[in-house]
Amino acid sequence: MVSRAPGLDSPGGSAGSDLERVDLNEVVLALSDALDLVGTHVVQHGKRVAFMAAACGRPLALEEEERTDLLLAAVLHDCGVSSTRLHQKLLGEDLSFEDAHGHADAGGELLARFAPLSRVAAIVRLHHTPWDSPARLEADSRTALLANLVFLADRVDAQLQARGDRDPLLSTDEIRRWIFARSGSSFAEEAVGAFLEASAAEAFWLTLEPHHLERALRDEMRIERHRTVPLSDLTDLALIFAGIVDGKSLFTASHSTAVARLASLLGRLDGLDEATCARLQLAGLLHDLGKLRVPDEVLDKVAPLDEGEFATIERHAFETFQILSRVEPLREIAGWAGYHHEGLRRKGYPFRIRAGEIPLPARLLAIADVFQAFAQNRPYRGPLGAEEILAQLRLFVEAGKLDSHGVDLVAANLGECFRAATLDASEASGAHSPPE
């Protein structure tokens, strides 16, 4: 189980949160939308790999649990990647390069922290390991085969992307020959045989088109073994995705965990019940999922953003809302997270909703987000002190951007709020000076 960030509480079941369970397959499929955003332009890579891996697994008579592990591993195989530059490299035609195993190891380490996905972690670690590599022999035979299926499907998609907008049916023979030529070396003979059988049908390739892929993969995951977990257990999975988002830039290290901690603190200070504070914590951890779509160079830019770059930034709250609202038990949380840039005078983004439509938890989350951002280094400024941050929050209240009641809570508990915002972020922030 994941080691929690200092001061980050596990949502307890005493308030009834454990009574609500969520389908882990549904949550993983929704959160994979965030991973797909890393490609910025080439999206749904994880879903294409998952569909192809599952199709190749059918001729192999996998057990139900193995099929489920294969699907989840394939959907999450690039969870060690948040950089758009690295994502572009990974979709190159090369079978391997310097960073390939690094992201596989990182992804495996992340997933190992969440007990329900611990077996999947071993598959992700090996998903860039050629079949004839000595490293493959260190894993059990079934894990190695499942990882190789993911590797094979991943390379098939890289081949497809290299051909651009060309109709996939025009490339099938060429790609099938490319895979066959690497049977016994890069790919297991068993995996290659399964791929050649599955990919002989035109439907295999046509299903990879976006308007068919979503439905096909959702159907696949409904068929496979359901693993329901208490909603409270999602904190561990949310911490993983928060780390993926915050790892995208040196300047956002620990941002999501600190926002979650401060938001839940503000909830408790305002007298919200335990279950609501637990959900507020989840919203804080996941509020910036949509930032994975923002190119690295925009997040790290020192100069002011131009109109196009700011438009790219503005999308992130909407993307977060869309990702989380796919899972019914997360829809309330989706609203809180998706509204964290809404102003009280319909001048925020992306929904421009009325003040009366913004619930208190969303208002508190917005304050936590702004407070923590001011407490961290950014490419264009250094971190601010507690009193300086409060002064900025007051200006935001005057401009109708933040809730005055919530900022009064901050003012009355400034020291505690500052500690919550900087508990594990100050060292990471201070270690990186803004670029010259």
Image (cartoon, rainbow, N blue to C red):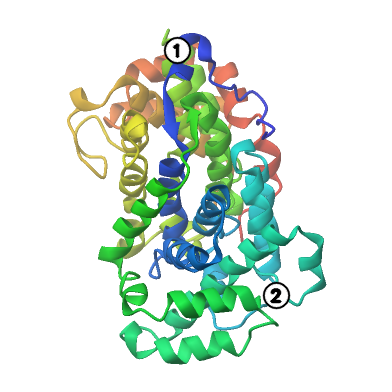
- Which quadrant does the C terminus fall into? bottom right
Name the side, left or right, on which 76 lies relative to 338. right
Picture quadrant where residue 305 is located: bottom left
Residue lying at 52% horizontally and 34% vertically, measured from the top left:
372
For the residue labelled by badge 2, is the local secondary structure a helix, a strand or a loop?
Answer: loop
Name the side, left or right, on which 394 lies relative to 229. left
The foreground one among 343 and 359 is 359
Q: Is residue 389 above or below residue 170?
A: above
Given the image, on which type of amino acid does mark 2 rest? Pro
Give the image location of residue 231, x and y in percent.
46, 27
Mark 1–mark 2 Cα distance, whole angstroms, equals 47 Å
Give the image location of residue 37, x and y in percent.
42, 59
- Which quadrant does the N terminus fall into? top right
Name the side, left or right, on which 340 lies relative to 121. left
| Residue 272 seen in the current view | yes
Give the image location of residue 116, x and y in percent.
59, 38
Picture quadrant where residue 118 is located: top right
Picture quadrant where residue 306 is located: bottom left
Residue lying at 36% horizontally and 30% vertically, measured from the top left:
329
Given the image, on which type of amino acid does mark 1 rest? Gly
The foreground one among 58 and 91 is 58
User: For residue 16, which numbered disc appears in the image?
Assistant: 1
| Residue 374 seen in the current view | no
Q: Residues within 10 Å of mark 2 (few under 14, many from 20)?
A: many
User: For residue 130, which numbered disc appears in the image?
Assistant: 2
The foreground one among 56 and 401 is 56
Residue lying at 22% horizontally and 41% vertically, measured from the top left:
351
For the residue labelled by badge 1, is the local secondary structure a helix, a strand or a loop?
Answer: loop
